[in-house]
């Protein structure tokens, strides 16, 4: 892809619909603000997961503790190489890092659609715009999304 023809965004059609005014949603000012904050938190979590995938891909065979640095243990070498490839090296882009990147783009597009609609609401309704600004001003930094620690090999039931 060239800079003149960037790859299409995952939600290009929805963005176009919103830009052309053919889409609307019914949300309160608080819901608009919370959706944006949740998207920001989710994007931070995705970047953290990508860093983990990158570290997995870059971990030397000897540091896995499986004997992958021993030429006689070919199954250990195969296993480690598969994990490393799935971290961030798969030629078909079917690796964790690339898949998370696609998810990141989708979240960005969701934010773009909501921002376009929110901007239209704020232009048309000053009371709505004031409510959005007041709610935004009352909030601190978004809370991080935290997963629950899991023990390998133990199934967690919700």
Image: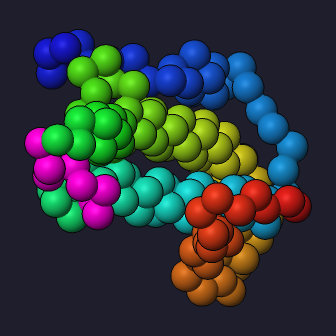
Q: Which color mode does the image show?
A: rainbow
Magenta: main secondary structure equals: loop
Q: Which residues are magenta?
A: 64-71
Give how far across and how far down residue 2 sits, in percent. Answer: 14, 15
Q: Quadrant of residue 150?
A: bottom right
Instruction: Point out the residue furthest to the front here.
Output: 72
For residue 75, side relative to residue 104 (left or right): left
Give how far across and how far down residue 24 sits, in percent. Answer: 77, 32
Q: In the image shown, does 146 or 136 lie closer to the viewer?
A: 146
For residue 147, side relative to residue 11 (left or right): right
Locate the N terminus and report the quarter of the image it occupies. top left
Question: Which residue is painted at 24% across and 21% down in the image?
Answer: 91
Residue 128 appears in view: no
Q: In the image shown, does 77 or 127 lie closer to the viewer?
A: 77
Give how far across and how far down residue 71 sits, in percent. Answer: 12, 42
Q: Quadrant of residue 134?
A: bottom right
- Asked if residue 46 lies in the magenta stretch, the reply is no
Residue 102 appears in view: yes
In the rendered image of this protein, does residue 101 appear above or below residue 150? above
Q: Quadrant of residue 94?
A: top left
Q: In the image shown, does 155 or 13 lie closer to the viewer?
A: 155
């Amino acid at each position: 892809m060239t800079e003149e023809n960037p790859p299409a965004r995952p939600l290009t059609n929805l963005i176009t619909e919103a830009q052309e005014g053919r889409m609307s949603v019914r949300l309160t000012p608080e819901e608009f603000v919370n959706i944006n904050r949740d998207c920001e938190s989710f994007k931070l979590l995705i970047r953290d997961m990508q860093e983990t995938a990158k570290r997995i891909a870059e971990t030397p065979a000897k540091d896995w503790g499986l004997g992958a640095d021993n030429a006689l243990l070919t199954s250990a070498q195969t296993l480690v190489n598969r994990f490393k490839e799935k971290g961030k090296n798969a030629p078909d882009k079917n690796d964790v890092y690339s898949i998370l990147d696609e998810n990141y783009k989708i979240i960005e597009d969701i934010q773009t659609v909501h921002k376009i609609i929110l901007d239209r609401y704020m232009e048309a309704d000053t009371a709505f715009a004031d409510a959005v600004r007041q709610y935004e001003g009352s909030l601190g930094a978004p809370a991080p999304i935290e997963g629950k620690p899991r023990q390998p090999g133990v199934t967690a039931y919700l």
